[in-house]
Amino acid sequence: MALMKTATTTSGMWMTDDCKRSFMEMKWKKVHRYVVYKLEEKSRKVTVDKVGAAGESYDDLAASLPQDDCRYAVFDFDYVTVDNCRMSKIFFITWSPEASRIREKMMYATSKSGLRRVLDGVHFELQATDPTEMGFDKIKDRAK
């Protein structure tokens, strides 16, 4: 597994090539609905934790996030405008639940900007500490 250094982050995390590849497959090929990323503290890497198939929903993404660990996620939100045009907006979500460790929250906070720079094409960002802060209604409201 090849590694590439993320753009300058204070945490010094490395990103696997799989991170960007999975994002590009979601963005351009539409083979994934979402990608969940995880920081591995010991190896100092950002890795792909889970990918959601094209047929999966936002609820599937929300259900895949751990209740006591932080994660990053990107979600491809497809919708139809009032003019009947199909549109797609990509959301970057920082999941930092209250039950996660303080050190983990700090690592995710300091590594976010480097990952975001690599994932080119994100339209909106959400930060959530509980499921209500990232409800599907918030996605729909932001996209339109």
Image: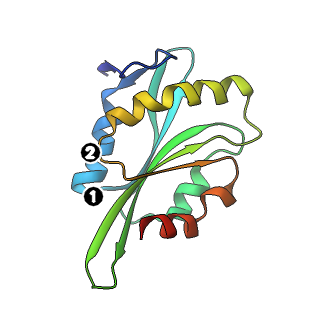
Secondary structure found at label 2: helix
Mark 1, residues whose alpha carbon is within 10 Å: few (<14), some, or many (≥20)?
some
104 lies left or right of 88: right
Nearer to the camera, 24 or 52: 24
The number of numbered badges drawn on the structure is 2
Query: Which sits earlier in the primary sequence, circle 1 or circle 2?
Result: 2
Location of residue 67 with respect to 136 vertically, above or below = above
Q: CA distance from mark 1 to mark 2?
A: 9 Å
Q: Position of residue 105 (x, y in %)?
A: 66, 30
Q: Position of residue 33 (x, y in %)?
A: 39, 58
Residue ID at (65%, 57%): 133
Q: Which mark is residue 24?
A: 2
Location of residue 64 with respect to 22 vertically, above or below = below
Location of residue 83 with respect to 66 vertically, above or below = below
Residue ID at (62%, 37%): 70
Mark 2, residues whose alpha carbon is within 10 Å: few (<14), some, or many (≥20)?
some
Q: Position of residue 117 (x, y in %)?
A: 35, 33
70 lies left or right of 112: right
Q: Looking at the figure, which quarter contains the C terminus?
A: bottom left
Structure colour scheme? rainbow
Residue ID at (68%, 60%): 132
Q: Residue furthest bottom?
A: 83
Location of residue 59 with respect to 26 vertically, above or below = below
Q: Which mark is residue 30?
A: 1
Q: Position of residue 52 (x, y in %)?
A: 43, 54
Secondary structure found at label 1: loop
- Which residue type does callout 2 highlight? Met
Residue ID at (39%, 66%): 55
